[in-house]
Image: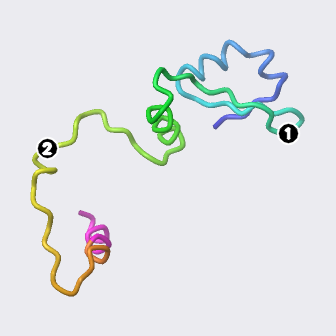
Amino acid sequence: MKTATITTVKNRLSALLDEVRAGESILILDRGLPVARLEPVTSHPDATGRLRRLERAGVVRVGDSPPPLELLRAPAPPVTAGTSAVDALLQERRSGR
């Protein structure tokens, strides 16, 4: 998230609005203290807005194509007796799968 002082916002409002239209959020500071946040308005304020905010923060990456159905339909790998599903997941992550 970018930051801008009140003076910068007054002098560069059009340019900052262009950045907001591109998906950037801007924190407005008054003498170093946050007073407002300038964020894009989405047509779907529910999950879509949260997802875009998480994407901008680098927490998630939104895909540009549908998930591969054959991967979702494939049977899950077997879990050996005496092993927990969490251990199997951690082992799979370590192996890079």
Residue 87 location (% of width, % of height): 30, 77
Q: Is residue 11 above or below residue 81?
A: above
Residue at x-position 27% and y-position 65%: 96
Residue 72 location (% of width, % of height): 16, 50
Chief secondary structure of the magenta span? helix
SS at mark 1?
Answer: loop
Q: Amino acid at mark 2?
A: Leu
Please tell me how crowded label 2 is: few (under 14), some (14-19), or many (20+) other residues with Cα within 10 Å: few
Camera-side residue of 60 and 96 = 60
Residue depth check, mark 1 versus mark 2: number of the one nearer the observer: 2
2 left or right, relative to 79: right
Q: Which residues are magenta?
A: 89-97
Q: Which residue is mark 1?
A: 32
Q: Quadrant of the C terminus?
A: bottom left
Q: Which residue is mark 2?
A: 69
Image coloring type: rainbow
Q: Which mark is residue 85?
A: none
SS at mark 2?
Answer: helix
Residue 23 location (% of width, % of height): 53, 27
